[in-house]
Amino acid sequence: RKEVEQDPGPFNVPEGATVAFNCTYSNSASQSFFWYRQDCRKEPKLLMSVYSSGNEDGRFTAQLNRASQYISLLIRDSKLSDSATYLCVVTTRDDKIIFGKGTRLHILP
Amino acid sequence: DAGITQSPRHKVTETGTPVTLRCHQTENHRYMYWYRQDPGHGLRLIHYSYGVKDTDKGEVSDGYSVSRSKTEDFLLTLESATSSQTSVYFCAISPLRQNPYNEQFFGPGTRLTVL
């Protein structure tokens, strides 16, 4: 099993719809979890950290399920500007920072 | 935006030539990282630094060396470039190596093509 796995997509979603991504991780001792956003030919930027209790930032909600070893990102009322690649990032207790390959999202007008 | 610049932003070189990429930060962050990003792969760590003259290898360090003589600069050197090193290289910085809510800030990237 790969250390961090994401569905590569692309997810083609109409504007205004809700879309959800999952990311699974293999190391049960993983400590920190993040979602980064990367626009085409740009650098990754932090979208949100993922807290154990789950957290929300506007239209974005992140959840962590330690028992099943996955994190999720939910985007509500999607906008054209949400089109990007979303990277799942996991850090482990031995200081490894592991990036997923990303999930591509296309919001359709 | 975090003050990170990378130079050059684009480079085309030939197999066997040495190449040095520069990362410069104005944030005075302790940790600096070099990653490469290739289609079909996530970002992969090449080397990182936890202070001046303190560096360590990442998961794909073969063929690369680094140096950090000042807090603000982290150099990545390909001693003898190969075609397999064609990639987009990102520098990143963070104030702390391991922190539950720590964020890495990335530079704009360098596109390197080795012919």
Image: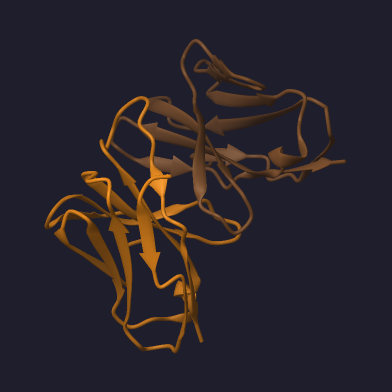
Chain colours: A brown, B orange
Query: Could you say which is closer to the camera, residue A16 or residue B61?
Result: A16
Q: Where is the C terminus of chain A found, in terms of image quarters?
A: top right
* Quarter assignment of residue B38: bottom right
Rendered position, B16 above or below B63: below
The residue at 29%/59% (across/down) is B24
Going by the image, does A15 lie left or right of B44? right
The residue at 63%/26% (across/down) is A73
* Percent of width and height locating residue A79: 76, 34
* Percent of width and height locating residue B7: 38, 69
**Does the rendering let one see residue A104?**
no
**Does the rendering let one see residue A17?**
yes
* Percent of width and height locating residue A35: 53, 33
* Percent of width and height locating residue B98: 28, 33
The residue at 67%/24% (across/down) is A74
The residue at 29%/73% (across/down) is B77
Q: Where is the N terminus of chain A found, in terms of image quarters?
A: top right
Going by the image, does A86 lie left or right of A27? right
